[in-house]
Amino acid sequence: MDPPLTAVDPAVAARWQRLAQRPVVLEVRGLGMRYPDRAGRPVSVLHDVSFTVRRREFITVVGPSGCGKSTLIRIIAGLTRHTSGEVLLDGRPIQGPGPDRGMVFQSYSLFPWLSVLRNVMFGLEMQGKGHDEARAEALQWLSFVGLEDKAEAWPSQLSGGQSQRVAIARALAPGPRILLMDEPFAALDPHTRAALQEHLLQIWQHIDITILFITHDIDEALWLADRVFVLQPPDAEHPGGWLQEIIPVPLLVPRTREMVATPAYRQTRAYLEQLIHPPRLAPVGERLPVFKLTKAGDEVL
Ligand SMILES: Nc1ncnc2c1ncn2[C@@H]1O[C@H](COP(=O)(O)OP(=O)(O)OP(=O)(O)O)[C@@H](O)[C@H]1O
Ligand SMILES: [Mg+2]
C-alpha cells in the first residue's frame, strides 16, 4: 500500500519537527493485556503495543470494533490493570486512577444526583479544595465550555451536547496532564458533533493538555489529530489487538473546515480508509454459502 503522502507542505513538516522535540508525557512499551475467557483461559486483547505521546499532542485512535481501543484507554486511566509491558505517565508507572488523567466516555457520565456545578466541583473538592474555591473554579470551567448559565441545572435537564461539555469541564477542572476520551461524541447528531469538535480544538489550543481520543469516524480522527493511531484486531501474526500504524496528519493548526478539501487531507483519508476497510479478500457470496439465496437470472442490476 502506498504511504499517504510523498511530499508534505514545508510548514507542516516544520511543525512535526517542533512536535518531536516536546517532552514525552505518555509512554507505552510492549503493552499486553489478556482477559480470562469463560473457561478461565487467557485471551489476548492487546499485543505488544508501543508508542509515545508528547506534550500537547492530540492523538486519535481508530480501529474496528473489539480491537482493544477502550481496553487501552482504561489501562492508561488506571481502571484496568495490564498484564505485560509498561505504561508511564511523565516517566512514572501508572498504578491506578489519578487526578493527572481526566476521562470522558461516550455515555454521559455525570452524577445525576448532583447539579451541573456540583459535578464540576466534585474533582476539585476531592483534591482538598474548600467549597468556595472549588465553586469559583468550577464556575470558570463552566464558562470556559459556555455553560455557566446551566450551573444550577440537573444533568437530566441538559441536551447530549451540553452533557458532554460539562463532562469535559469536569474532566479538565482538576488540571490533568492528559485527557482520555472514549468515543465522546459518538452519540451526538452530526451538527452537535461538529460543534463539539470545534469546541474541543479551541480548548486544546488554549490550555496545556495532551489528548488521547478514540473514535470510529475517520473524518473526526483526521480533523482533530496531530497523529492517528490505527489499531487492528488479532490475526495470524498477532495474538491480540495491535498497533498497525501511526499516521501523522499533514494539516496545520488551527484547523479549518476548508482543509478537508485539500489533496493532503484527501490522500491521507484514502490511505486510512484502506487500512481500516481493506478490499474484501473473497467475494461475499463465496464466503457466505449459507446465505446464497439467489440464482442465475436474479441479478439486481
Ligand atoms: N472485562 C473484560 N473481560 C473479558 N473480556 C473483555 C473485557 N473487556 C473487554 N473484553 C474483550 O476485549 C476485547 C476488546 O474490547 P474493547 O472494549 O477494548 O474493544 P473496542 O476496540 O473498544 O471496541 P468498540 O469499538 O466496540 O468499543 C473484546 O473482545 C472484548 O470482548
Ligand atoms: Mg470501545
Image (cartoon, rainbow, N blue to C red):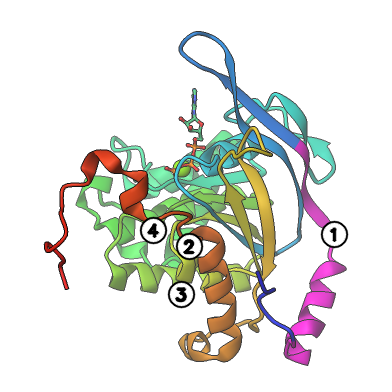
In the rendering, at what x and y percent does residue 31 appear? 73, 36
- The Cα atoms of the two marked residues, 2 and 1, are separated by 39 Å
Q: Earlier in the sequence, mark 2 or mark 1?
A: 1
Q: Amino acid at mark 2?
A: Pro
Q: Earlier in the sequence, mark 1 or mark 3?
A: 1
- The magenta span reads 7-30
Foreground: disc 2 or disc 1: 2
Label 1–label 4 contact, CB within 8 A: no
Residue at 47%, 40% (x, y): give it. 66
Q: Which residue is mark 2?
A: 279
Out of 208 and 269, give the one closest to the viewer: 269
Q: Which residue is mark 4?
A: 185
- Residue 271 lies in quadrant: bottom right
Q: Earlier in the sequence, mark 4 or mark 3?
A: 4
Instruction: Say the numbered circle drawn on residue 23.
Output: 1
Q: Earlier in the sequence, mark 1 or mark 4?
A: 1
In the rendering, at what x and y percent does residue 267 appear? 58, 81
Residue 151 in view: no
Instruction: Say the numbered circle drawn on residue 57.
Output: none
**Which residue is the extreme one toward the right?**
21
Q: Which residue is mark 3?
A: 198
Q: Amino acid at mark 4?
A: Phe
Residue at 52%, 49% (x, y): give it. 171
- The Cα atoms of the two marked residues, 1 and 4, are separated by 29 Å
- The Cα atoms of the two marked residues, 4 and 2, are separated by 28 Å
- The Cα atoms of the two marked residues, 1 and 3, are separated by 26 Å
Q: Amino acid at mark 3?
A: Glu
Foreground: disc 4 or disc 2: 2
Identify the image quadrant of the N terminus.
bottom right
